[in-house]
Amino acid sequence: MKTRNKIKIRVTELLMIARGLLSTRHPILAHIVPMRRCNLSCAYCNEYDDFSAPVPLEEMKRRLDHLASLGTSIITISGGEPTLHPELDDIIQHIRRRGMIAGLITNGYFLTPERIERLNQAGLQHLQISIDNVNPDDVSKKSLRVLDSKLENLRRHAEFYVNLNSVIGGGIRNPEDAVVVSQRAIDLGFSTTLGIIHNDRGRLKPLSETEMGVYQRLGGQGKLSYARFSGFRENLAEGRPNKWRCRAGARYLYICEDGRVHYCSQQRGFPDVPIEQYTREDMRREFSTPKSCAPYCTLACVQIVALFDNWRSPQTIEPYRVRRPAAREVARQASAGVPDFGEDPSPFSTSAKAALDPTASEC
């Protein structure tokens, strides 16, 4: 990555941080889904299907225009697998034309040199890949062995920042794989983050002795990432709740492929308003609304956004009961073959199959 590009991106980020601290009246980060279909079928994931069509480009532009009108600073494109969208480059270009920072979360399977050059030309500024293991297994094919050639392509050709996210916790069979993934990221010159995920019953529990050893080894390793500024992982590692003010629905927005605003990928159904109808009044309400799922939340992106405001503006509005997805989301998951795990009264519960989603750990 050229030094000039690094400086330009970092200056843009510093201006975003300053603006976020000076005003609470705009979203800092919005995740938007242009396509729910994915080429993989990871056993833990509740964020994909194998049949959905891409959202038309003009519809995506209208959604992005409204996010820009709300003053959104950063747009992260996720899925499904967003690189399957035939007009992804146009979407990125539109984000940049509207003055917003453009990020992308991908499984990395389609990152050929030519595809990376197109992302460069479109103006992409950040890319994240979550790698689950060293060797593929029946849980995940997002493995270092499969993706290493794609990482080399990124090292040679990317003119944007690249972050590799490794994971430990429930469902990951070889915790030591996270060390290998993290070291590979450092060797390639990328930033690296570590996600802690739930166990296979949808509950957060303390890390095992082996997992805690990996966590401690990786705690200070690698290039500095904004995700390291939040100390919430220390509590997650011990199975303790975090005390913070989740600003989802205000400072952080999740826009699904249907164009509706939700708290996040794991709490779809609240507030469930079409993005074109979402107003600053909606944002003011959600800014002051506590979220009952917050104490055991593992979504780093939402936690990081909350750092701008944890020190101010107590939340005083009666919260929704956020436990399970809305009926329309349950129906969509059923049509995609994703089982409904039902409501779990435990305060550790998450919706549907969020339990084993490592991308949810880092967003």
Image: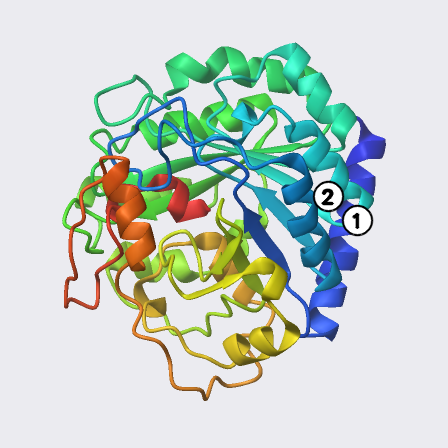
The residue sitting at 66% across, 19% down in the picture is: 116
Q: Is residue 64 above or below residue 230?
A: above
Q: Position of residue 341 (x, y in %)?
A: 16, 51
The residue sitting at 69% across, 49% down in the picture is: 62
Callout 1 amino acid: Arg
Label 2, secondary structure: give it: helix
Residue at the spot of label 2: 95
Cβ atoms at labels 1 and 2 below 8 Å apart: yes
Label 1, secondary structure: give it: loop
Front one among 100 and 238:
100
On the question of residue 124 being in view, the answer is no
Q: Seen in the image, is 120 located left or right of residue 190?
A: right
Q: Seen in the image, is 23 located left or right of residue 78?
A: right
Q: Is residue 33 above or below residue 350?
A: above
The residue sitting at 64% across, 48% down in the picture is: 75
Q: Position of residue 74 (x, y in %)?
A: 66, 51
On the question of residue 152 being in view, the answer is yes
Q: How is the image coloured?
A: rainbow
Quadrant (top left/top right/bottom left/bottom right) for the N terminus = top right
Question: Which quadrant would residue 112 be assigned to in this image?
Answer: top right
Front one among 198 and 208:
198
Residue at the spot of label 1: 98
Question: Which quadrant would residue 154 be assigned to in this image?
Answer: top right
Spatial separation of the CA atoms under disc 1 and disc 2: 5 Å
Callout 2 amino acid: Ile
Front one among 131 and 80:
80
Tally of numbered discs: 2
Question: Which quadrant would residue 224 be assigned to in this image?
Answer: top right
